[in-house]
């Protein structure tokens, strides 16, 4: 019994020892030092630290059996780049941390990333979003936040959705602010929006500095602003903007997610941000997230009771997921020894940066982090090129005490949409209904147009050209009665009419582009370039849309017709040749008429040959008579009479055709010989080049460059300033020192030809242009509105009234329409229907005649004589056709076939034949059957006999 008791005690004691040993073994963990660099003086930094601590607590609570335990070594960056660098150096050299989480800002992260690359220590940032960090190309830098490069597409999508053309970015003047600007410019240009001005504000700027910058923006036309800065600076910016009245109706404010993700923590300044739109990272509000927010709020208030207004944002959730991912990565390689190795330095005077040790575990940890995938607190955790692969954004509108979601942007849609799972294709044109209703600044529900006249009442400075000729378009002169400069003309009146159509007032003043003495200050290219340089806000006048000009200025829709034409003298080219009688008709009409003469002659011969002695006789006589008869109809002098009704029908149609043709020929020939024919001296520009003729152009115009490109030598090009000089040069001609042609745009040359309509004509257009238009800076918001007004003006009657006012014809051109006649030969296209009718009538007559003839002598073709071939029967029919038909008033012809030694003719047997072995002789008797008065058997009277040996 005693032994049994001892055995039980031994076993119990052994079991206790084994359990203690296993417990001791399981409690043995590997501590891993991890650095955390945040701004502990900022409540936001404390919020991040709480998220990181909660992540590690949650991770190891659910994975108590894991061997590794992350040990946080927190350092304060003191909101300074140098502080962050010092903290990173301390953690790397003295603590030998295996990874560093943070720092918060992109500027602080830049140096820390470089340090991590040297020490082979992974740097995990959950809030540094500047695209410039990507350019460091460090294999030890991990960005667990959305790259700002992704959100510029969302911002440009908002701008495109509302059709704004000009925006001004307001950004913090550091790496974080400047890093996004190049990508923002590119994204806006893709949607045809431009940045006329940038407004950087230093992070340490005073309220006076901010106020000064906002005053500068108020003097500009653009009213769409994109704000990219930290929440603290933006709070002061919007407070000043509200004081200056820039949060009123007509203004548009859009913020990036650096502000959008922290809007919930900016309750004190939301009153100054009413109506703005903000882009923020999209995180699905799951049940897991709601529970975590409740736990976080409780813990944060316990640890930081003095900070009661801090709210959990998207960056805090990224910090939670970053700590979670780092714990997983270390556990995956728990058997690896976390050691540092001293660097080999080549300098005597080494610094701390030269003597810190290199982590032997860094590369393995980087590889482990790159392959981690899990469902995080902020959504799916998935890295691509060491960056978080998330690019969905939510668009919110600040309204009242909070924000309201109005839309989303995802790469799949490629634009803003109301619903996140919208199935509409991105190639469908966008509209202003792609977002939910928005309450804009000033509590306005109307979409701002994005620009306005500056608040200080500055007028648009509109440059106008100063020139000597063609003053009908633009005329700058000094009014002696008022001693003021006035501007009139067609272009000026069109511009004023366009402004009347605009739905808003547009103050302006005309500024002549002139020197002190009143002469032109340069060419049209120089004038247009003044808009690009900012000396003029617009150019109004006869400025042509050109490709080289559109590189630096914008044009409205053209308000005149386009094209470069050639004006040349006209001369009387009445033909004095002996062959002028052939010119009234074209060659195709001459040949058609000749063919129809021959054809009609043949038709009449066929119809009249058997019954009309005038068309019989020798073959030459018949041919001559037929042609003579046909050609004599041209002068209606034909002597032969036609007997057949079919021939008479054909002649009626043909004589009608000849009547019209001959009368038209007579009229055309008379005009050729008597009426003045004004035709251009030159019709092809290549003739001018080939003959090296002198040509003209208007001074200060781009036509000179076009002519040089075409191949004209500089010595053959002459410039002119007014219509009178052009007229004098064209009158002289190229041989006498003048010019053979003048090249200029259609509106100018229309004026010139209207004045000298009896001397010159317009050829072309020779070159294509886009017409006259008004000039504004590239991307000006006025361009679409003015273009729409131009379209409305040109579609109405007002533009015609303006043209009539300024482009009236000269008095000497009132009756020019009767002087300027151009005769041309008559062609077949004018008479083809007549010849068609004559041809159809003739063919119809021939068909009727042929059908009647074949029906009458059908027995010749259908005879049962097997010895008669088809060809011989046809030849027999031709012989019958060649014989004259007798008078048939009381008789009827019959054909009888019989052997040549006998004729058997009877009323009932019209055909008899005899077959012989050697030959068959067929005899055809044409009998005349005369019926008796008592209807007895007819009397057979042979009238002629024709024998053919077959």
Image: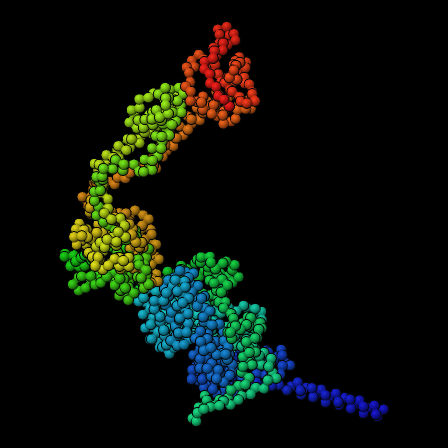
| Residue 394 spot, x, y in % from top left | 48, 66
Residue occupying image coordinates x 31% and y 70%: 216
Where, quadrant-wise, is the N terminus in this rendering?
bottom right
| Residue 560 spot, x, y in % from top left | 29, 52
Residue occupying image coordinates x 49% and y 90%: 344
Q: Residue furthest front?
A: 918
Which quadrant holds residue 132?
bottom left
81 or 358, nearer to the observer:
358
Is 409 above or below relative to 172? Answer: above
542 or 949, nearer to the observer:
949
Q: Residue furthest bottom?
A: 348
In the figure, is residue 658 to the left or right of 312?
Answer: left
Which quadrant holds residue 68?
bottom right
Residue 471 shows up from this direction: no
Is 25 above or below relative to 506? Answer: below
Residue occupying image coordinates x 28% and y 33%: 665
Q: Count up the numbered dots.
A: 0
In the figure, is residue 724 to the left or right of 400?
Answer: left
| Residue 911 spot, x, y in % from top left | 53, 17
In the figure, is residue 404 to the left or right of 739?
Answer: right
| Residue 77 spot, x, y in % from top left | 45, 83
Is 883 above or below relative to 497? Answer: above
């Amino acid at each position: 019994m005693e032994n049994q008791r001892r055995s039980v005690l031994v076993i119990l004691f052994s079991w206790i020892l084994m359990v203690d040993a296993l417990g001791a073994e399981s409690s043995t963990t590997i501590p891993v030092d991890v650095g955390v660099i945040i701004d502990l003086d900022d409540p936001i930094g404390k919020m991040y630290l709480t998220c990181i601590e909660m992540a590690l607590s949650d991770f190891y609570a659910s994975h108590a059996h894991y061997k590794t335990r992350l040990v946080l070594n927190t350092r304060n960056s003191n909101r300074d780049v140098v502080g962050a660098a010092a903290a990173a150096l301390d953690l790397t050299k003295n603590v030998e941390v295996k990874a560093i989480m943070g720092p918060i800002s992109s500027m602080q992260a830049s140096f820390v990333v470089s340090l991590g690359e040297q020490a082979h220590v992974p740097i995990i940032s959950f809030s540094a979003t500047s695209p410039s960090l990507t350019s460091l190309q460090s294999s030890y830098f991990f960005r667990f936040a959305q790259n700002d490069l992704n959100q510029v597409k969302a911002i440009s999508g908002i701008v495109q959705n509302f059709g704004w053309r000009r925006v001004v970015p307001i950004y913090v003047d550091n790496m974080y602010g400047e890093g996004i600007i190049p990508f923002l410019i590119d994204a806006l240009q893709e949607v045809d929006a431009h940045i006329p001005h940038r407004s950087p504000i230093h992070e340490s700027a005073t309220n006076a500095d901010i106020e000064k910058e906002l005053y500068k923006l108020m003097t500009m036309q653009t009213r769409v602003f994109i704000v990219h800065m930290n929440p603290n600076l933006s709070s002061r910016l919007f407070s000043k903007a509200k004081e200056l009245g820039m949060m009123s109706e007509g203004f548009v404010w859009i913020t990036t997610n650096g502000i959008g993700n922290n809007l919930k923590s900016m309750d004190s300044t939301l009153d100054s941000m009413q109506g703005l739109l903000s882009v923020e990272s999209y995180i699905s509000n799951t049940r897991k997230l709601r529970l975590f927010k409740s736990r976080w709020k409780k813990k944060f208030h316990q640890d930081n009771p003095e900070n009661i207004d801090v709210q959990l944002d998207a960056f805090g959730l990224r910090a939670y997921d970053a700590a979670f991912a780092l714990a997983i990565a270390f556990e995956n390689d728990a058997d690896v020894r976390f050691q540092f190795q001293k660097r080999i330095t080549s300098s005597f005077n080494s610094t701390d940066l030269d003597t810190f040790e290199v982590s032997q575990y860094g590369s393995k940890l980087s590889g482990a982090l790159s392959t981690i995938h899990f469902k995080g607190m902020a959504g799916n955790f998935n890295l691509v090129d060491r960056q978080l692969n998330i690019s969905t954004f939510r668009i919110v509108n600040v309204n009242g005490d909070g924000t309201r979601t109005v839309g989303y942007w995802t790469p799949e849609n490629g634009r803003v949409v109301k619903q996140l799972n919208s199935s509409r294709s991105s190639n469908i044109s966008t509209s202003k209904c792609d977002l939910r209703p928005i309450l804009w600044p000033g509590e306005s529900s109307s979409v701002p147009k994005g620009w306005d006249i500056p608040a200080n009442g500055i007028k648009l400075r509109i440059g106008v050209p100063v020139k000597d000729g063609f003053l009908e378009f633009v005329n700058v002169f000094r009014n002696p009665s008022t001693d003021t400069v006035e501007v009139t003309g067609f272009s000026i009146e069109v511009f004023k009419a366009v402004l009347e159509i605009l739905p808003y007032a547009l103050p302006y003043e005309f500024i002549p582009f002139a020197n002190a003495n009143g002469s032109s200050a340069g060419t049209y290219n120089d004038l247009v370039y003044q808009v690009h340089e900012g000396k003029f806000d617009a150019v109004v006048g006869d400025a042509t849309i050109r490709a080289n000009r559109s590189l630096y200025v914008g044009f409205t829709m053209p308000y005149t017709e386009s094209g470069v034409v050639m004006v040349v003298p006209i001369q009387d080219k009445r033909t004095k040749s002996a062959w002028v009688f052939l010119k009234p008709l074209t060659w195709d009409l001459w040949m058609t008429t000749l063919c129809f003469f021959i054809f009609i002659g043949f038709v009449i011969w066929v119809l009249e040959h058997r019954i009309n002695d005038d068309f019989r006789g020798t073959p030459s006589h018949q041919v001559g008579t037929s042609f003579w008869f046909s050609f004599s109809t041209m002068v209606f002098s034909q002597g032969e009479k036609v007997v057949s009704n079919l021939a008479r029908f054909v002649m009626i149609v043909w004589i009608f055709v000849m009547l019209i043709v001959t009368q038209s020929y007579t009229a055309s020939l008379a005009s050729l010989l008597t009426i003045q024919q004004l035709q251009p001296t030159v019709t092809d520009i290549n003739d001018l080049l080939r003959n090296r003729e002198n040509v003209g152009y208007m001074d200060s115009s781009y036509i000179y460059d076009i002519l040089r490109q075409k191949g004209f030598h500089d010595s053959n090009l002459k410039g002119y300033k007014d219509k009178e000089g052009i007229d004098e040069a064209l009158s002289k001609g190229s041989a006498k020192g003048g010019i053979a042609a003048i090249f200029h745009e259609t509106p100018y040359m229309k004026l010139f030809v209207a004045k000298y309509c009896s001397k010159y004509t317009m050829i072309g257009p020779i070159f294509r242009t886009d017409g006259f238009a008004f000039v504004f800076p590239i991307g000006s918001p006025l361009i679409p509105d003015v273009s729409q007004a131009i379209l409305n003006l040109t579609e109405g009657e007002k533009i015609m009234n303006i043209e009539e006012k300024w482009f009236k014809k000269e008095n000497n051109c009132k009756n020019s329409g009767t002087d300027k006649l151009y005769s041309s030969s008559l062609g077949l296209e004018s008479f083809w229907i007549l010849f068609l009718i004559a041809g159809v009538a003739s063919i119809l007559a021939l068909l009727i005649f042929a059908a009647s003839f074949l029906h009458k002598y059908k027995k010749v073709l259908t005879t049962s004589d097997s010895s008669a071939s088809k060809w011989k029967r046809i030849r027999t029919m031709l012989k019958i056709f060649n014989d004259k038909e007798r008078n048939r008033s009381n008789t009827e012809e019959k054909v009888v076939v019989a052997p040549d030694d006998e004729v058997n003719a009877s009323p009932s047997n019209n055909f008899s034949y005899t077959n012989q072995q050697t030959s068959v002789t067929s005899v055809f008797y044409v009998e005349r059957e005369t019926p008796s008065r008592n209807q007895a058997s007819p009397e057979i009277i042979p009238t002629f006999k024709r024998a053919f040996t077959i």
